Amino acid sequence: MDLLDYPFMVRALIAAALVGITAPAIGTYLVQRRQAVMGDGLGHVAMTGVALGFVLNTSPVWMATLVAVVGAVGMELIRSRGKTSGDVALAMLFYGGLAGGVMIISVGGGSTAKLLSAMFGSITTVATEDVTAVAVLSAFVLAVTIGLRRQLFAVCQDEEFARVTGLPVRLLNLLIMVTAAVTVTVAMRIVGLLLVSAMMVIPVAAAQRVTRGFTATLSLAMAIGLVVSLTGTVTTYYVEAPSGAAIVLLAIGVFMAMTALSTPLARRRAKAARAAEEVCTRDDVKV
C-alpha cells in the first residue's frame, strides 16, 4: 500500500510540513538576535508543561504551550530589565524546566518514559487533535513572522534605532519570544523538544550560505525546512528510524551542500563586483 493510504502517515506529513515551515521562520529572527540556542531552553521548560499534561490528563501540546510561553515571557522580562544576564536566565530555563518535568511526572505517579516521545519526537503517533493543535499554532507563528517581518527585523537588527523610529521594542521582543515558545511546542511531536532548536537554526544557517538579504534568507530557510521535514518523514516510513533524528541529519546534509556551493558562488560574486568596479573606474577616467 502507498504511504498515503495510511491515515497516520497523512497526519504525520501534514504535521511535518507545518513544522518544517514554522521552525525556520521564527529561527531566522533568533539567529539574527544571536539567540540560536533559545529553542533548547524553551524546549526544556516545555518539558514541565508536558509532564503537567500527562499528570492532569489534559493535552500535553496545549499545556506545554502555556508553560513555554510563561517561561519565555519571564526570561525576556528578566533580560530586558537587566536583573541578571540573558545567559543566566537561559540556564535557569534549561535546568529548571527539565528538572521540573521529571519531578512533576514522578510525584504524579507517572513514568518518566512518557517524556521520551516529547523529548525525541514520535511523528507516527500524531493524532487528529494533535494535527489541529499544530495547525492552529502554526497559523499564529506564520502570521507573526511573515506579517510583522519588517518590524521584527528592525528590532533584531538594532533595538535602539527601532526605538527611535517609534516601534514598540519591548512588545516586539516579547512577541518574538512567545512565538519561539509556540514553535517549540509545534515541533514537539515531530522532531522532539531536544532537537527543535536544530530545526530553528540549521535551515537558516544553510540559507545564509547562499543568499543575500533577510527576505531571501527567510524564504529559502522555510523551503529547506519544508523539504527536509517531508523527506525525513517519508524516509522513516520505509526505513525504521526516528523521524526527528532523520530530519535533523538531512538538514545538516543540506547545510554542508550549501557550504560547498557557497565558495564558488562567493568567487563569482567577487569577480562580478571587480568587473563592475573596473567599468565604473573607466567611466570616471573618460569623464
Image: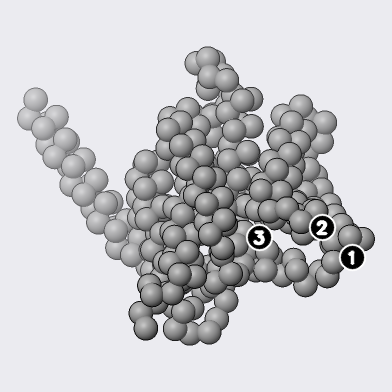
Q: CA distance from mark 3 to mark 2?
A: 19 Å
| Residue 28, placed above or below residue 113 | above
In the depicted structure, whether residue 254 falls above or below residue 180: below
Q: Which residue is mark 3?
A: 193
Residue 55: which numbered mark, if any? 2
Location of residue 17 by image quarter: bottom left
The residue type indicated by label 3 comes to Leu
Which residue appears at 17% of the width and 36% of the height?
Answer: 281
The first of marks 1 and 2 along the sequence is 2
| Amino acid type at mark 2 | Val
Q: Secondary structure at mark 1?
A: loop
Type of amino acid under label 1:
Gly
Q: Earlier along the polypeptide chain: callout 3 or callout 2?
A: 2
Can you say which quadrant of the picture contains the C terminus?
Answer: top left
Q: Is residue 275 left or right of residue 156?
A: left
Q: Residues within 10 Å of mark 1 (few under 14, many from 20)?
A: few
**Dot 2: what SS?**
helix
Number of marks present in the image shown: 3
Please, is residue 16 above or below residue 97 in the view?
below
In the rendered structure, the answer to whether residue 173 lies left or right of residue 3 reads right
Residue 64 showing in the rendered view: no
Relative to 174, is 46 above or below? below
Residue 174 placed where, x, y %? 64, 32
Could you tell me if the residues under marks 1 and 2 are in contact, i.e. CB atoms within 8 Å? yes
Res. 77 mark? none
On the image, numbered disc 1 is attached to which residue? 109
Residue at the (89%, 65%) spot, across then down:
109
